[in-house]
């Protein structure tokens, strides 16, 4: 268990359950061994700390920690009732924050639940975002993931700025039906100093974000080596994203409208409002 992907896939997400309303929850008795707590009484101490943190943060304990009991076999067809706790994702997050950080699984759990809790918060907020807010949020995410993509490409052998520009073009060609960055720029009728990513709507930005994240993952997962292999990988992922859009009946990225206002203009307006 040496990375968070393996950890999340084989532990936390495996023991996750859903109630009759489709709401997710975890059982403390199942979470305890995942976090390497062999003794229930020791884990109860951690749960109590998490409840205190929950209350201190202004949240209702009852909304995130529900005491339950269940029957377990003790041999010879005999059973007895034991205490358990139904936990929300937020409760699990608080538990791992208050668990022993020296345990590897706890350290991984802290990272995992912090990420997932933030993702859920963003999902809940995203539906209420205006188009400009969505563009700004996705563009910010894309900036971060483009840095990760550049690191992954470098690890595959894409060394110089020129080689990286070629690598990026392969991704664009896959996603945009053969169009390179310069051709997309021309298609959008942008000025020389204007970035194509700053002049995309939220749908187009989301397609490019998916292209970037999936290419980064594939380069690392498949241990891609060599410039051309990296370029081909980027093209393949871009093509797959395009194919998915087509299968869903969506408009191709190059056919989506170009917003009148750039992301930089939106950022500048927000700065003025804050001032």
Image (spheres, rainbow, N blue to C red):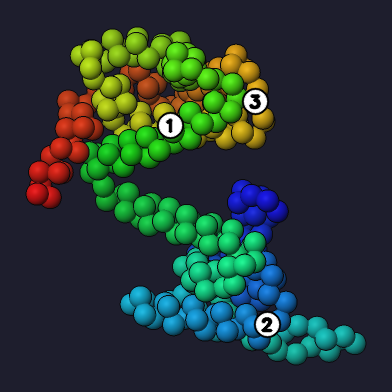
Residue 53 x %, y %? 43, 78
User: Of tags 2 and 1, which is closer to the observer?
Assistant: 1
Q: CA distance from mark 2 to mark 1?
A: 44 Å
Number of residues whose C-alpha sits closer than 10 Å to that of mark 2, classed few (under 14), some (14–19) or many (20 or more): some
* Whether label 2 touches label 3, CB < 8 Å: no
Q: Secondary structure at mark 3?
A: loop
Residue nearest the observer in this picture, 22 or 208 = 208
Mark 2, residue position:
40
Number of residues whose C-alpha sits closer than 10 Å to that of mark 1, classed few (under 14), some (14–19) or many (20 or more): some
Q: What's the residue at 67%, 30% (across, down)?
A: 222
User: Of tags 2 and 3, which is closer to the observer?
Assistant: 3
Residue 28 x %, y %? 61, 75
Q: CA distance from mark 2 to mark 3?
A: 45 Å
Mark 1, residue position:
146
Q: CA distance from mark 1 to mark 3?
A: 17 Å
| Disc on the earlier residue, 2 or 1 | 2
């Amino acid at each position: 268990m040496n990375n968070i992907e393996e950890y999340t896939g084989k532990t936390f997400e495996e023991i996750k359950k859903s109630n009759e309303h489709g709401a997710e929850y975890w059982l403390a008795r199942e979470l305890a061994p995942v976090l390497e707590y062999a003794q229930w009484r020791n884990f109860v101490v951690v749960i109590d700390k998490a409840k205190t943190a929950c209350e201190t943060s202004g949240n209702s304990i009852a909304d995130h920690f529900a005491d339950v009991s269940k029957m377990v076999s003790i041999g010879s067809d005999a059973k007895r009732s034991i205490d358990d706790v139904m936990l929300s994702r937020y409760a699990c997050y608080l538990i791992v924050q208050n668990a022993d950080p020296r345990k590897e699984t706890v350290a991984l759990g802290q990272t995992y639940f912090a990420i997932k809790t933030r993702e859920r918060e963003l999902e809940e907020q995203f539906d209420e975002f205006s188009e400009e807010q969505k563009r700004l949020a996705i563009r910010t995410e894309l900036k971060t993931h483009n840095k990760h993509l550049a690191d992954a490409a470098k690890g595959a052998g894409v060394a110089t700025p020129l080689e990286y520009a070629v690598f990026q073009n392969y991704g664009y060609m896959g996603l945009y039906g053969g169009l390179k960055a310069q051709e997309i720029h021309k298609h959008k009728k942008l000025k020389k100093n204007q970035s194509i990513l700053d002049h995309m709507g939220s749908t187009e930005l989301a397609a490019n974000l998916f292209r970037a994240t999936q290419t980064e993952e594939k380069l690392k997962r498949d241990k891609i080596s060599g410039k051309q292999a990296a370029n081909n990988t980027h093209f393949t992922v871009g093509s797959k994203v395009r194919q998915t859009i087509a299968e869903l009946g969506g408009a191709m990225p190059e056919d989506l409208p170009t917003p009148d206002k750039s992301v930089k203009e939106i950022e500048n307006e927000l700065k003025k409002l804050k001032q």
